[in-house]
Image (cartoon, helix red, strand yellow):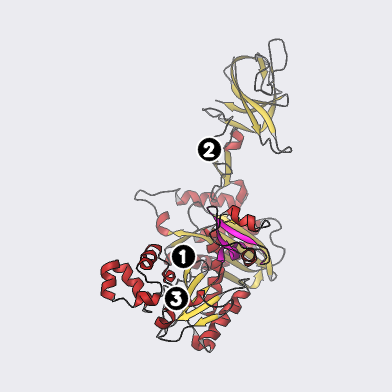
Amino acid sequence: MTRTMVLWAPDWPIVAVGGPASVPAVVLDKGAVLACSQAARAEGVRRGMRRRDAQSRCPGLVLHEHHPDTDARAFEAVLTAIEQLSPGVAPLRPGLCALEVPARFYGGEAEAAAVIAERLVDLGVWDVRAGIADGLFAAEQAARRALAQDSLVVPERGSAQFLRDLPIEALDEQATVGLLRRMGLLTLGDFASLPPADVHTRFGTHGALLHRLARGQDPRLISRRQVPPEFDATLLLEPPLDNVEPIAFSLRTTAEAFVSDLAGHGLVCTTVLIEVDADGSLATSRRWMHPRWFGATDLIDRVRWQLGVDGAISAPVDAVRLIPEVTEPLGDHADSLFGGGPDERVERGVARVQSIVGHEAVVSVMVQGGRGPGERRLLTPWGERPMPARAPGRPWPGALPAPAPATVYREPRQAMVVGAEGQTIGVTGRGLVTGEPARFRADPEQAWQPVASWAGPWPVDDQWWDEAAARRLARFQVVGVDGSAFLMIVEGGQWWTEAAYD
């Protein structure tokens, strides 16, 4: 008979957020206490309390909002640690997992539970309780009734006897439990004594399953999680090399195997971490992203560029590691019927240019969010995925209307705009123009010319909450009598030419 062990860490949301055990803390979900620490429980705080009631009982209570992703990520380390001792762990939910009891290897069921609990203490999980029984349901109930940092072992074929005196609420089915209590069935033994055929007729298939659980006959099997395969690839250089090209040449077989292993599992790598060891220690590490996915040649190019940076390595290289950080299904990146993405010859040509002039010297241009044309320009090194700093779809008060200027100067050029009597034109704090623009000079080397038309201002009060980074400016569109059109800004009484229209 296969025996099942269930490991339970009480108040797991509290464990996941961390913090000293002596500090009273709670995790809130929709304004109610989802979990509380032992120190908070000693102050009278209980699960299900409203925030205000909990704080009235413990004024120094530390509050945390519930984030299920945080619970799952923290529990992943627990699952990994257990798998190092016994493979085939089945996560039930964060804080609760099951596995087949590795009794023979550790000398007994209680001994196996003690070894696993000791391993989890090293991770900072100070209270983990184990239940061991013939089925999953009985093992979970045993774990919930075990003492702190201890185990409760139900004898073989003794699950029905163990479950008999437990309250009917152990089924954790609110609707069914309420009905059973109204029928006078207060324990699992009372429910188990009913004829199976009558239970199926009254409660259906799900009720029949609950009835079997109450009788200690658990038909459910443990669904072991699949341990993700290891895709890291390492090139060991013996003897170490201090020249980039021999290192890149030696990496080809490793890079091809890296890509093939991923493809064999239907995956491609879109973000890779490349680590280089020199003289026995980490010399350089960089995360690379690809707009599509990495091939073997792409990986070799990235290693070449990473090692080609001045000061990247100061000693001979003895190891190069390729670590896939983001993998995606191959089908999501397959070409359509009529192809897709840039031509491979174009990519190889651009990559060749990058190898000559440098990775950062060849860029692709995209548009991101912002108010001015300079802010909206996004330059990304060719071959990397664009990462906009500002979302283009959001509203940007003070942004210019279409069309956008064709030429944006790398640095704004000093300019001047005056009125009919030669007075400098400005903008008040309320965004009002102090006069009618009559003449302008878009560049210190250009001659003055009359203003044919103008539009604006578009005032911008940017980062007003940060005294060091705050900017107050206004933009104007100015057209000269010769047909030339410019985008100008006035800031602090000084005019600048930011861009030009065709």
Task: Please state if 198 lies on the left or on the right of 377 as rendered.
Answer: left
| Disc number for residue 449 | none
| Dot 2 amino acid type | Arg
Q: Which residue is mark 2?
A: 394
Q: Quadrant of the C terminus?
A: top right
Cα distance in 3D space between marks 3 and 1? 50 Å
Around disc 1, counting alpha carbons within 10 Å, would you say few (fewer than 14), some (14 to 19), or many (20 or more)? Answer: many
In which quadrant of the rendered view does residue 411 lie? top right
Judged from the image, the secondary structure of the residue bearing numbered disc 1 is helix
Mark 1 and mark 2 lie on one chain; the one further toward the N terminus is 1
Label 1, label 2: how many angstroms apart (C-alpha)?
A: 37 Å
Disc 3/disc 2 C-alpha distance (Å): 57 Å
Q: Which residues are magenta?
A: 9-36
Secondary element under disc 3, as helix, strand or loop, is loop
In the image, residue 159 sits, relative to residue 346, either above or below, namely below
Q: Label 1, on which residue? A: 262
Q: Position of residue 363 (x, y in %)?
A: 57, 45
- Based on the displayed image, in which of its 4 quarters is residue 472 positioned? top right
Q: Quadrant of residue 441?
A: top right
Which residue carries the number 3 mark?
A: 166
Q: Magenta stretch containing residue 207, yes or no? A: no
Is residue 368 rendered to the left or right of residue 88? right
- Left or right of residue 148: residue 206: left
State which quarter of the image contains the N terminus: bottom left
Is label 2 in a helix, a strand or a loop?
Answer: loop
Above or below, 81 against 290 in this view is below
